[in-house]
Image (spheres, helix red, strand yellow):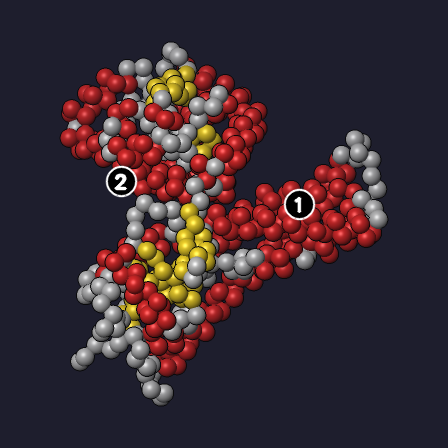
Amino acid sequence: MAEQTMTDQAAPPGTAAVPEDGAKAGRHKDSRRTAGIALALTDLIMLQILLAIALGLRLALADLLPVIITTEIYRGVAIALMLMPLAWLAAGLYPGDGLPAPDRLRRRSLTTVIGFLLLASWDYVLQGHEWSRGLAAIAWLLALIVLPITEALVIGRLIRIGRWGRKVALYGSGHAVRDLSVRLRSDPALGFIPAVRLKDQASSGTGTDAGDDAGLPQMTVARARAQGIDTAIVCLAPSALDQAPALTWSLDFPRVLLRLEVDGLPSLATRTRELGGRIGIEISRGMLEPRKRHTKRVLDHIIAILALIPALPIIGLAALAVKIADPGPAFFVQERGGKSGRTIRVLKLRTMYRDADARLAAHLEADPAAAEEWRRFYKLKRDPRVLPVVGGILRRTSMDELPQLLNVLTGEMSVVGPRPFPAYHLAAFDEPFRRLRGSVRPGITGLWQVSVRSDGDLDAQQALDSFYIRNWSVWLDLVILGRTVGAVVRGGGAR
């Protein structure tokens, strides 16, 4: 039978496929509607809870800042807060599938700030009194911190019950479709669910082939649209860019995304511009902008100082436990690669025996499998150097890294960035990547740690560190910090 083209029509009415496709389309729309309602209701409920907490905090400060908060004031703030989800709806956050996590955080945070400032200005100017006696300001600060966390929890729950994301149709070569499908499935929070691979037009010549299609069913555009799929992602090689106009218009989808099969370009820190009737792609090099670099340094110092307050007693207790497990220095200083190729002295709580190097060499010589694992990861799942109990706990919880907050204050490190590696580890990478890494300060935590922790090999380290450096923004740092807390609590993968 001759292969159908993308412009083929759906099966004639009366066949079994039509009601089946209609039912699938309905379920898909209901799923996205459910996700949007769940997120909106969660925000409404959490705003009222945060307002009640704000009231308690404000009353606790009554001795320092005497105020009278009447029932009328409280009711007015409660009603005003109920308008905030309308702003988040306008920002595209309900459900907001297809938005990367940093973009979601940026939209929510900026909308929250603007919304509260508008409400405060309206009340202060028109009502003629101080805005809620500080009540709304406290609720606003709590909302900036708490609501992104509850949003992530709700999205996680929706993913587990199969109610998150929009189905997408993929178009391109077998290799490109397979790669994209794997990447989208590995990041379910993004909300693009690979559902079908579109059949090729006989005259397109874009390179779709009979190769691996990642297990996706192949179908025509009409059949995919009948199943409720409204988004197509087209994988285009640089040599096929001239085919993009005709190709995108031939795909009868309300939303078409182009994925350029080009390595090395930022994917988060970009936006399109109109340039003389052509599409221009603006690439933001945040790490090269002085204002953004200064912002990162200010945040580093604020976070490091705030984190050191609770961290100091933890560090003291952990140091005592280390000395009990293996008498000797509780802290360990190692020379590692820093910014611009400089060597920095990284401070850690000691988690290994004092004769760790000798133990490692003997273990690798006696165990070929361990030697291969070390060659790939420069880490071992069963590391003979690690102190029993104490060393494992410190590593799983990443508490051994807490002293590096001092490295942040001295300017040698950042809170978020690529991990500082020893010279032998850096030597395993090629020179261009070492230069890229050396363009930024190393960090206590980073994208690699929150994505694969210690389970990623050298290729994963290089890919994730490169992505972070090329796509850096304050919002990406905040997302990584949030995920770091989750990874530490779970303790999974660290060694």
Please identify the residue farthest to the front as the structure is shown. Answer: 276
Decide if residue 80 is on the left or right side of residue 319. Answer: right
Count of numbered marks? 2
* Point 32% across, 55% down: residue: 260
Disc on the earlier residue, 2 or 1: 1
**As displayed, is residue 143 above or below residue 423?**
below
| SS state under label 2 | helix
Q: Provide the residue designation for mark 2.
A: 459
Q: How many angstroms separate mark 2 from mark 1 (CA)?
A: 42 Å
Q: Where residue 140 is drawn, which disc sits there?
A: 1
Residue at image coords 39%, 18%: 345
Nearest the camera: 62 or 477? Answer: 477
Q: Residue furthest top?
A: 328
Inspect the image, locate mark 1, and give the three-letter code of the amino acid beneath it. Answer: Trp
Quadrant of the image containing the N terminus: bottom left
Please state if 372 lies on the left or on the right of 48 as rendered. Answer: left
Residue 272 pos. (x, y %):
44, 55
Q: Position of residue 373 (x, y in %)?
A: 22, 34
Residue in the image at 31% along x and 24% along y: 422
Q: Check disc 2 and give the amino acid type.
A: Asp
Q: Circle 2: is it few (<14), some (14-19), or many (20+) Cα within 10 Å? A: few
Q: Which quadrant of the view contains residue 449?
A: top left
Local SS, label 1: helix
The tag on residue 169 is: none
